Structure formats: structure tokens, C-alpha cells
Image: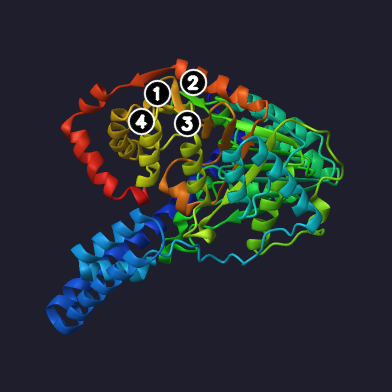
Amino acid sequence: MSGQWTPDARQEAERRVERRISAGVSIFVCAATVIGQISITLLLTAFLRENAGYAYLLLEIAAMAVALWVYQRAGSPSYKLAWMCLLTATPVPGMILFCFWGGTRQSKRLSLKPVPPVPESRERRLDYARNLSALRGRSPAWGRLAAYLMKRDCWLFRDTTARYFPDGAAFFESLIADIRRAQRYIFLEYYILAEGRVWDALFDALRERAAAGVEIRIIFDDFGNLFRFSGDALQALRDARIDAQMFNPVHRYIGRVYFNYRDHRKIAVVDGETAYTGGINLADEYANLVERFGHWKDSAVRLHGSGAWGFAAYFIRLWKMLGRTLSRPDDDYRPRRTFPAASGYCQPFSDGPFRNPDYPIEETYLQLISSAQRTLYITTPYYAVEEAIQTALCIAADAGVDVRLCVPAIPDHKLAYLVAETYWGQLLRHGVRIYRYTPGFLHAKSVLVDGEAALVGSTNMDYRTFQLHYECGVLLYHMPVVRDIRRDLESVMAQSELYTLEAWEARPWSRRLAASVLKLGAIWL
């Protein structure tokens, strides 16, 4: 009868309610813990001031000493400045919070095992070195960047073809087709797995391959899926003999706010021969099957050939860091055939808090910006950077480089968008052109330099990407796909409005004030 629920529909509705309650409780516990720590800090500060003057004085002196120590440590200037301001302006509360939250220790003290990168044989290292030598001979600037990343176990590959996806629909169609062709294994690592039409199609393909004996392993971030992926969906994976591992459960580290560290990577690998990366998560909005913030604009890249191994190695390492084991030796996950020669070079890369205070992704952005001679196009949904990147963009524009920054016109996080606006005035004054994508939300993360090199990945231009999250991407040097990326970015700009300095200066005073205050805490947004 019309208006009545079937038993299946009623059960699904009940599951959704249970999932939201469970996720809400997790978020509430995290928020309550942080609020509780701040409350304890304030109460303890008041008690010491009134009843233990000597202890209060000692804490004030200790706060000054710690502020000096923070200043002298290596690491992010913004993080150091935030803690120094807190420690000097409010010494006792600042000192107590420093003890609660670990101060400048951004390295991840999770229950992650110290696991070295997947070993590479001497012969393979020599092959990577030959690739580097050839790239240096063709483009010294890109050779310099590639050498920097190879020092951090991000290898340079040839014999790889690449396909660029300017939208989620084409990406999912290709990914599912490759999954259905899998013969040996499938690795998936995503910040968001969301139940819906996309997940239903993916799960059907995964379940069929698992039944055929294909090894399937999935890593997904807990925080990214609190409201998106139910216990029933996770159980369905296990029932299909698909091994799924949650990254950093939010309830486990709330005592030291380590839930702030997330696995933001987007990786899919099939048989060690094909790999995907980019900004696209496994959810309906990425294919515009549902509308959240207007048209969702995103991008991804498919690698087929030797370069796919780079992403397989990153997955294997994190899988082991999470305390899990594999059914076969690492080398059994390499591609089992050679690939025909292909134009150009690709370099998968990954980064995470375990490297701090070394920030390879931030340094990669800096080198891309400083190497630009003619054009520099950037897309990012968020913008909150250190002074070094801001200055590098201004210098490039002053030197005559055509610098263009593409951002959303419809943001998903309004507070972060307000912070981004505080940077734009300086960029505009130096001649950087800023395009706001008016059809909706621009989530693509890409850099294109001189039509020669491009970056596509999970990397935003903000503190979280550079210092807090596990991230990944691929650099493409002199590959034919770079032309496809340029055409897509030109299309994005054609659909966008050019933001002007006059518009920036005409912002209401209330918006300016709010943005300035929020910028003080930009490292936590």
C-alpha cells in the first residue's frame, strides 16, 4: 500500500538511525574530551593562582622556557608561532594545554609500527637512477625535484601510460572495469567510503572478484566515514572475504587529540599493473549523483605500467604499520610483466606525520612554484599556507610567470574559506589571477607548470595536507596526459569568475574581522 514501508525499507531506515547515533556518540565523546581538558586547564589555573602561588610562578617560568625551546625547534613556523603566543600570553593555561596536547609533536604517536619502505633491489635502484639521469638531461629543474623525492623513497618510473579523468563519473566507470579484470589482488585506500549507488556498484565488482579468489584489502579512515559507512556495510565486506582495516579510530586517541591525524590518501591498485590516485573519494557526490555544493568538480589519474608499483608499495607499508600482515612476500605484489616504452616519466609520492618536521609535499609545491618559467596553474579547494609558499607565488608572478589559482565559489567548509580569503589580497596585488569556480565546489587538487609537468593527488594547499594528514599523489613529467590536464584547467577557468582586488577590498568589515580571528587558529581548521 502507498505510504507503508516494506520490512527491508524499515530495517534500512533503522540501520541508518543506528549508524547516525553511533557516529554522533563518537563525535560527542571527542568534543566532550577536548572541552573537558580546556575546562580542567582553566579550573586548575584558577586553583593554583589562589592557593599555590609558588607552583603558579614555577609554571609561568616553565612556560617561558618552553616557548624559547619551541622557537628553537625545527618545524612549521605557524605551529611554533601558535604555541609561542599561547605560552607567552597565557603561560599557565598554555603550559597545561601543552602537556595535554603534545605541543609541537606533530609526529604521529599512534599504534603504528615503525615499518621501513618496501625494499628495492640494487638492480631496480640502478634503473631508477638511470631514469633520473635521463630526466635531468632533458629538464634540469624536474630532475632536481625528482632527485629530492627519490631521497625520500619516491621512485621515478618510465614505461607508464596515464589517463586523466576530469570528473568522477568517468573515473568510477574505469575503476570498476579494472576491478572486474583483476586476477591477483586489489588494494583500495580512501578517506571516504560512502554507502550509495557508487559503493553498490563497486561492492558488486569487489564481491565477484573475491569469490573468484582475488586478494582484496581495503584501508579506510574512521573519521571520514563516521556518518557514511555502516557496521553492516563493513560486515558485508568481511562476509565477502574482503579484508578491511580502519585507520585511526577517533575514540582511541582523544586524550591527546590524535584524531586530528587522518589518512587522506586516495589509492587503488589492481595486480600491480594499474593504479589510480587523485582527489576523488568513493561516494556519490563525486560522480554528481547527489548534489551537495552545486556541481562537484574533481579529478584523478590512472597509471598503467611500471609506475603503478609505487602506489602498491605505499599501501603495503601502511598496511604493515597498522599491524597487519600480507599473505605473500612483498615482491609477489609487483607487476609480473614488462611494459612497452612510453613517453615521459611519472613519480608517485606519499607523505605523512611520521616524517615531521620534514615536509616533502610542501617542499614539492615550493619547487614546482619556483621552477615555473611561463605558466603556473593551481587548483585547490582550501588555501592556508606558510609564508614560504605565499611568497614564492608572489615572486613568480612578479617575475612574469602567468600564475593562476582556481578555488571554489561554493565552499564546503565556510570557516576555512574565510581563512583562505585573508591570503588573496597579497596574491592579487602581485598579479596572481584568482578564479572562483561558480558552478559549484572545486575539489580537484592539481598543479600544472609550463605545460611540461603536472601534479595530481589528494593534496590540498593547507596545513592539514602539509603537516597532519597522510597524503599521496603523482608527478607527471613530459607525459602526453599533461596536455589533457591543461585543457581541463582551461575549461575550469572558462567556467569561473575572475576574482578582483576591488572585490576583495569590498568585503564587509565583519567578514574581514572574522577571517582575521580565524586565521590565528588556521592550523587547526
Q: Secondary structure at mark 1?
A: strand
Marks 2 and 4 in Cβ contact (< 8 Å): no
Q: Which amino acid is tagged 1?
A: Tyr
- Residue 371 position within the rendered picture, expressed as x and y whole percent measured from the top left: 50, 37
| Residue 492 circle label | 2
Q: CA distance from mark 1 to mark 4?
A: 19 Å
Q: Between tags 2 and 3, which lies in front? A: 3
Q: Secondary structure at mark 3?
A: strand
Q: Between tags 1 and 4, which lies in front? A: 4
* Residue appearing at x 30%, y 71% in the figure: 66
- Residue 404 position within the rendered picture, expressed as x and y whole percent measured from the top left: 42, 26
Marks 1 and 4 in Cβ contact (< 8 Å): no
Q: Between tags 3 and 4, which lies in front? A: 4
Instruction: Check disc 4 and report the residue beneath it.
Output: 398
Q: Secondary structure at mark 2?
A: helix
Q: Which amino acid is tagged 4?
A: Asp
* Residue appearing at x 26%, y 25% in the figure: 501
Q: CA distance from mark 2 to mark 3?
A: 11 Å
Which of the 4 quarters of the picture holds residue 503? top left
Please tell me whether residue 282 is drawn above or below residue 327 in the rendered image.
Answer: above
| Residue 435 circle label | 1
Instruction: Check disc 3 and report the residue beneath it.
Output: 378
Q: CA distance from mark 3 to mark 4?
A: 17 Å
